[in-house]
Amino acid sequence: MANSTNDQKKTTRLYHPYQDLNVPIQKLYDLPTSPELLFSEESSKTHRSWGENIQYYAGCGYLSGAVIGGAKGTVEGLRAAEKGESLKLRLNRVLNSGGQTGRRFGNSVGVLGLIFAGLESGMIHFRGRDDLVNSAIAGLGTGALYRAASGPRSAVIAGAIGGISAAAAVAGKQAFKRYVPI
């Protein structure tokens, strides 16, 4: 047995995938800090396109709404459980409640993201610059459009809340970028 393990050690070697490349292993993972772009025209872009904007806001809105709504529905399902129910029935109640509430919240917040992205991209196109004002106006318009069916008073209040929250989010992001080194 001892001879076979010694023979095996002599006939095998450690695998090193970069040995024939003559690349110093220390420099192999020194990645550049500047962005690497496929096309040079991409370097002049200062913001996302309207399609990227819609996909980003609607997707993030749907996902976050579905997660928050699913958690809320799960808690509601747990609270609605009655004494004497079997575990299978309780589990079914929790899953149904979480799925239904998650879908509803996800769709609502996804629509908000869709409206916001469309309005913000339109403002960037018409004003010709990308700044805090575009986001504030897009938030105002999103809130107003979303609650317009509930009446003018509700639309004005929702618009004000949307505008203030969008402006606060953009200002907070800019302050975070400026004062927090990452």
Image (cartoon, grey):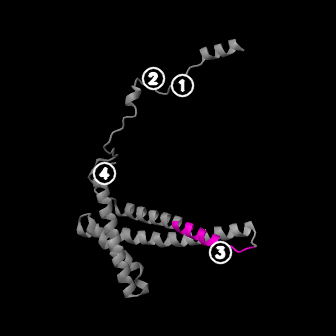
Q: Label 3 sits on what residue type?
A: Ala
* 117 in the magenta segment: no
* 80 in the magenta segment: yes
The residue that disc 2 covers is 20
Residue drawn 45% across the image and 72% down it: 111
Mark 4 vs mark 3: which is more N-terminal? 4
Mark 2 vs mark 3: which is more N-terminal? 2
Residue extent of the magenta highlight: 68-83
In this rendering, which labeled residue sits more in front, label 2 or label 3?
A: 3
Q: Secondary structure at mark 2?
A: loop
* Residue density around tag 2, few if under 14, some if 14–19, many if 20 or more, within 10 Å: few
Mark 4 vs mark 1: which is more N-terminal? 1
Mark 3 vs mark 1: which is more N-terminal? 1
Query: Do callouts 2 and 3 mark residues in contact (Cβ within 8 Å)?
Result: no
| Residue nearest the viewer, comparing 24 with 128 | 24
What is the CA distance from the residue labelled 4 to the residue labelled 3?
Answer: 53 Å
Mark 2 vs mark 1: which is more N-terminal? 1
Q: Looking at this rendering, what residue extends furthest in the top direction?
A: 3
Query: Do callouts 4 and 3 mark residues in contact (Cβ within 8 Å)?
Result: no
Q: Is residue 42 above or below residue 153?
A: above
The residue that disc 4 covers is 42
What is the CA distance from the residue labelled 3 to the residue labelled 1?
Answer: 59 Å
Q: Label 4 sits on what residue type?
A: Glu
Q: Give me the disc on residue 80.
A: 3
The residue that disc 1 covers is 15
| Residue nearest the viewer, comparing 174 with 57 | 174
The percent position of residue 45, horizontal first and vertical second, equals 28, 55
The percent position of residue 20, horizontal first and vertical second, equals 45, 23
Residue drawn 34% across the image and 59% down it: 48
The quadrant holding residue 23 is top left
